[in-house]
Image (cartoon, rainbow, N blue to C red):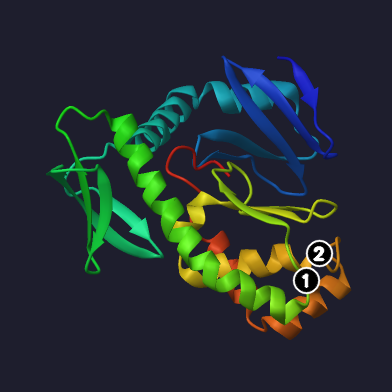
Amino acid sequence: MHHSKSNNPGFEVICIGGIEVELNRKAIKNIHLSVLPPNGRVRLSIPIETSEQKIRLAIVNKLAWIKKQQADFAGQARQSIREMVNGECHYLWGRKYRLKLTEAKGRYSVTAKGNCRLELAASQTTSIDNKLKLLNRFYRDEMQRTLEKLLPQWEKKLGVSADSLNIKKMKTKWGSCNIQAKRIWLNLELAKKPPECLEFILAHELVHLLERHHNERFRALMDKHMPNWRERRDLLNSLPLAYEDWSY
């Protein structure tokens, strides 16, 4: 059983039977085992004075159960990868759309039809990867169109101006701001979320041009210019970040 410490006191990671287990020593009476979504992390909450022997037994007796739970999570994660097939669900501005594939007459394209259908025109031989690229290009265009309206409004409101505003796929952040260069990056995933989320992240990054830290002044500026920013933030944080990897 090898131990590795993390920065958190009372928190250690051990390896038993090829499984990493986070130990969480707490003022509790009984041992409690959990396998956590989305990727099957194993956590054992234990009374502070629990012996190594007891810890090992608690895990070894439950190895089969732990592996079954982890396999279930792995199965779910795989189903979430987009296959770009007819009827598949995709989101645009917080609404659910169904994908419809059609044979392209001219340019390959993605078009939103009404409030429920995304039509992807390509050839039958187009790979999943290239269909995804088409969809991402569509998301990028949607975001750029929206930002062309929003950016001037918010620059005027805050009395700031960004030198550049770019969109890219980011794994862990909704947005970022390089304050020296006045360069703002927004996550392409925001095109899938309700529009008030994009506006919240844009305002948030622009406010950083006035205040670099998340301090009282920053919050006061947000309160003044977007009184409901906390609701928008909570809405955004309650939504999964991406299909490809939703462990954030």
Does the rendering let one see residue 82?
no
Rendered residue at 66%/75% (across/down)? 154
> On the picture, is 153 further left or further right than 218?
left
Q: Is residue 36 above or below residue 67?
A: below
Q: Residues within 10 Å of mark 1 (few under 14, many from 20)?
A: some
Viewport quadrant of the N terminus: top right
Residue type, mark 1 in image: Val
**Res 142 → quadrant:** bottom left
Q: Nearer the viewer, residue 143 or 59?
A: 143
Residue type, mark 2 in image: Leu
Q: Are marks 2 and 1 in contact (CB under 8 Å)?
A: yes
> On the picture, is 171 further left or further right than 244?
right
**Res 24 → quadrant:** top right
Query: Residue 40: x, y in percent?
Result: 51, 34
Rendered residue at 67%/70% (across/down)? 203
Q: Is residue 20 above or below residue 158?
A: above
Q: Identify the mark at residue 160; answer none if there is no mark.
A: 1
Viewport quadrant of the C terminus: top right
Q: Identify the mark at residue 197; answer none if there is no mark.
A: none
Rendered residue at 82%/55% (across/down)? 179
Earlier-in-chain disc, 2 versus 1: 1
**How many angstroms separate mark 2 from mark 1 (CA)?**
7 Å
Query: Residue 53: x, y in percent?
Result: 70, 21
Rendered residue at 86%/66% (across/down)? 211
Q: Select label 2 or label 1 by which is in front.
A: 1
Q: Identify the mark at residue 209; answer none if there is no mark.
A: 2
**Res 172 → quadrant:** top right
Q: Nearer the viewer, residue 30 or 122?
A: 122
Seen as rendered, the residue at the extreme front is 106
Query: Residue 10: x, y in percent?
Result: 82, 39
> On the picture, is 65 further left or further right than 23?
left
